[in-house]
Amino acid sequence: MLYRDAGVDISAMDKVKRRIAGIARSTYGPQVLSEVGLFGSLCRVPKMHDPVLVASCDGVGTKLVVARLCGRYDTVGIDIVNHSINDILTLGARPLFFLDYIAHSRLAPEALLAIVKGLGKACRDSNCSLVGGETAMMPDIYRPHDFDLAGFIVGIVERKKIIDASRIVAGDILIGIPSVGLHTNGYSLARRVLFDKARLKVGSRIKGLARTLGEELLQPHRSYLKPVLPLLGRIHALAHITGGGFYDNIARLLPHEVSVVIHKKSWRPLPIFRLIQRLGDVPDEEMYRTFNMGMGMVLMVAPAQKDRVLGSIPGSRVIGKAVRGTFGVSVI
Amino acid sequence: MLYRDAGVDISAMDKVKRRIAGIARSTYGPQVLSEVGLFGSLCRVPKMHDPVLVASCDGVGTKLVVARLCGRYDTVGIDIVNHSINDILTLGARPLFFLDYIAHSRLAPEALLAIVKGLGKACRDSNCSLVGGETAMMPDIYRPHDFDLAGFIVGIVERKKIIDASRIVAGDILIGIPSVGLHTNGYSLARRVLFDKARLKVGSRIKGLARTLGEELLQPHRSYLKPVLPLLGRIHALAHITGGGFYDNIARLLPHEVSVVIHKKSWRPLPIFRLIQRLGDVPDEEMYRTFNMGMGMVLMVAPAQKDRVLGSIPGSRVIGKAVRGTFGVSVI
């Protein structure tokens, strides 16, 4: 008996891995020391007074199911990189490097490469080096067309520039920056409503949507790095609106006796969210607890900074206010 | 329709996550700045002249299937942490922090906690901080009892102390350090042979094995950090014997015109490997290409360092030699 009789063909995997290595190399910044193929990836720490690493790990979630239904694998890599970049950006960090974990059963080499091309593109766009990763073929865990994609990011920030949400005070203004769709959360509910309950298909064309339903759902997670990075010194807190929506992601930042009120009338949710709410008869609160509703990042700033921030980020707008109180987050 | 109708109960997950957070906190070293629950984890960079980060990502692989068959979840966390620690150790790095990715369908909270307890134990044992992770419940991707576990590690090494395998020269001695079993690779072949072909069960008791077959297969991956760390300055190269066995893991380190000869008679493979080979009629070369055969880490040292290294690592022994040549790795 040979290893490949057990369903794992090391040499076929090796071919794909060589092409993956080429994509990874295209993302390397000057701080990366390693050649691909060692047991670990080497990255110098940039010169700083008191450098602090900021790390985060996340998966794409069941947006992967939509990718599979569409047979389209070039967007989910962008999703996980940009999701991760936004997460560490909330602490004031810029990205250093990223590693991916892809697990599957028998994804075609072209699909694997499309995933990695997405990772590489998003990394290059944000000066983040894709320094490593693992591609695991496990037919005993994953069904033939299923796969999973997770990512791990490390960024860096000067210690005294860490965004510390304790700066939030009553009176702060909440500014939302638009999303381009669901980004990377809420897909379990969205799929139940759209595909199971309303019996739509990924190829369905729906009035009000510029693309097929599948393409609309696969719009890649937007990175907020470029618009937000120059403003970090002016911001009291950032909330990345992911799983848990406006409630959980803002509530966990709030200091004692500060709460926020978000005015849902201050922006019109993207058509895809209105469609999900209508077809699923989903209560308003559940929508704002599950989805970003068209605002993927929320900044909290002192009133004196409001115009400067609004003026430098296209599409941004005031969506609420911090107030005295212990109610947490109220969406009215 | 509510989010929990889609099969994802956020509040049930939150309860488990709070207990996970407690385990994570127990691993924190003084360099960790963050409280659990932010969008990222904060870790100060230790003071060094030219610090280099060493990162690695890997999964447990189908050892997870054995854990599921045994209904035992407290070892796989140890596996992925120690596997990762060994990987970055080969470059001379000591661990700073670790993040985990657990994906599942409906693992019991007790199983999830057992996994995380294993992660926490292994992290504490190696002064590695478990600073974050993601637990994703995805019934649409994972079958009811399946799950996946991957990990990401970041370690640190002073730039001039990076173990650079180009130090290897003909004449170097190969020293093996014992493993405690398969560690974290070769499980696809092992399961095919033991469970499918030979029809054994995880509860089977086999002559020559001190434990049931399942317990033998679940022996946790050994960390080589403590024995190897004090010797790093004396070592030309380290190979962690994982997927690809003695061939791939040593070959990728070798400089031009240096090859190695490994004498398989120099140690007796652990009983579990002899059992797999016998029941599966697996050729010798395939065994040494797939498994660690009882030697989980191979050090390459100058002859003058041999006795010092052998004397300070219990169980270590000479298993081969580096020679002039371009044949790569030969196991004879």
Image: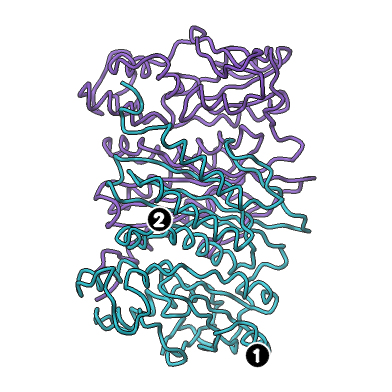
Chain colours: A cyan, B purple
* Labels in figure, total: 2
> In x, y percent, where is residue B324?
66, 13
| Residue that badge 1 annotates | A307
10 Å crowding of disc 2: few (<14), some (14-19), many (20+): some
Say which quadrant the N terminus of chain A sits in.
Answer: top left
The image quadrant that residue B70 belongs to is top left
Q: Is residue B319 above or below residue B155?
A: above
Q: Is residue B3 above or below residue B126?
A: below
| Disc assigned to residue B135 | 2
Which amino acid type is marked by label 2?
Thr
- Residue B155 seen by the camera: yes
The image quadrant that residue B190 belongs to is top left
What residue lies at 51% left-to-right and 83% top-to-bottom? A259
Taking A262 as reference, is A174 left or right?
Answer: right
Q: Is residue A203 above or below residue A131?
A: below
Between marks 2 and 1 in the image, the one whose residue lies nearer the viewer: 1
What residue lies at 29% left-to-right and 24% top-to-bottom? B212
What residue lies at 55% left-to-right and 24% top-to-bottom? B297
Which amino acid type is marked by label 1?
Asp
> In x, y percent, where is residue A286?
33, 78
Give the structural element (helix, strand or loop) at label 1: helix
Say which quadrant the C terminus of chain A sits in.
Answer: bottom left
Taking A177 as reference, is B308 left or right?
Answer: right
Taking A26 as reference, is B7 left or right?
Answer: left
Q: Name the one closer to the observer, B101 or B331.
A: B331
Q: Name the one closer to the observer, B308 or A264.
A: A264
The answer to whether marks 2 and 1 sit on the same chain is no
| Disc assigned to residue B108 | none
Q: Please report, as a chain letter, where disc 2 is located.
A: B
Marks 2/1: CA distance?
39 Å
